Image (tube, rainbow, N blue to C red):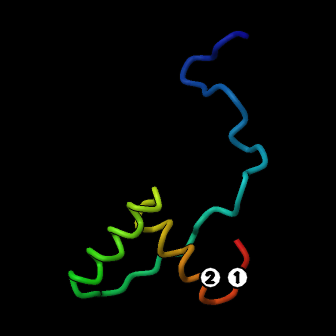
Amino acid sequence: MKRRKGGQIGNDNGVKAEKPATTTLRCRVVPEDKEAWQSKADSNNQNLSEWVIATLNEAAGIPS
């Protein structure tokens, strides 16, 4: 395959596995809560954002 200068290899417009996150949710929390949530996320091998999204979706009855 001939490589173009500055070009990328692969198909960036291919089908994605899931919908991209396009909205931001911000909230203020007490540090003790955040530390507890971070600890739980770490124990599940997730980052905090992934854990929060999964937990909120479960509470709302949204299938994963």
Q: Nearer the viewer, residue 27 or 60?
A: 60
Q: Residue at x 64, y 13 (%)?
A: 3
Measure the C-alpha gap from mark 2 to mark 1: 6 Å
Residue denoted by label 1: 62
3 displayed left or right of 14:
left
- Where does the image place residue 57, in percent across and percent down from the top left? 61, 81
- Where does the image place residue 54, in percent across and percent down from the top left? 57, 73
**SS for dot 2:** helix
- Where does the image place residue 29, in percent across and percent down from the top left? 28, 87
In this rendering, the count of numbered labels is 2
- Where does the image place residue 60, in percent across and percent down from the top left? 64, 89
Label at residue 18: none
54 displayed left or right of 16:
left
Residue denoted by label 2: 58
Q: Residue at x 33, y 68 (%)?
A: 39
- Tell me which amino acid carries mark 2: Glu
- Tell me which amino acid carries mark 1: Ile
Q: Residues within 10 Å of mark 2 (few under 14, many from 20)?
A: few
Q: Tell me where residue 13 sits by quadrant.
A: top right
Q: Which quadrant would the N terminus be assigned to in this image?
A: top right
Against 46, residue 7 (above or below) is: above
Query: For the view shown, which residue lies furthest in the front direction?
Result: 43
Against 40, residue 13 (above or below) is: above
Q: Residue at x 73, y 35 (%)?
A: 11
Q: Nearer the viewer, residue 28 or 33?
A: 33
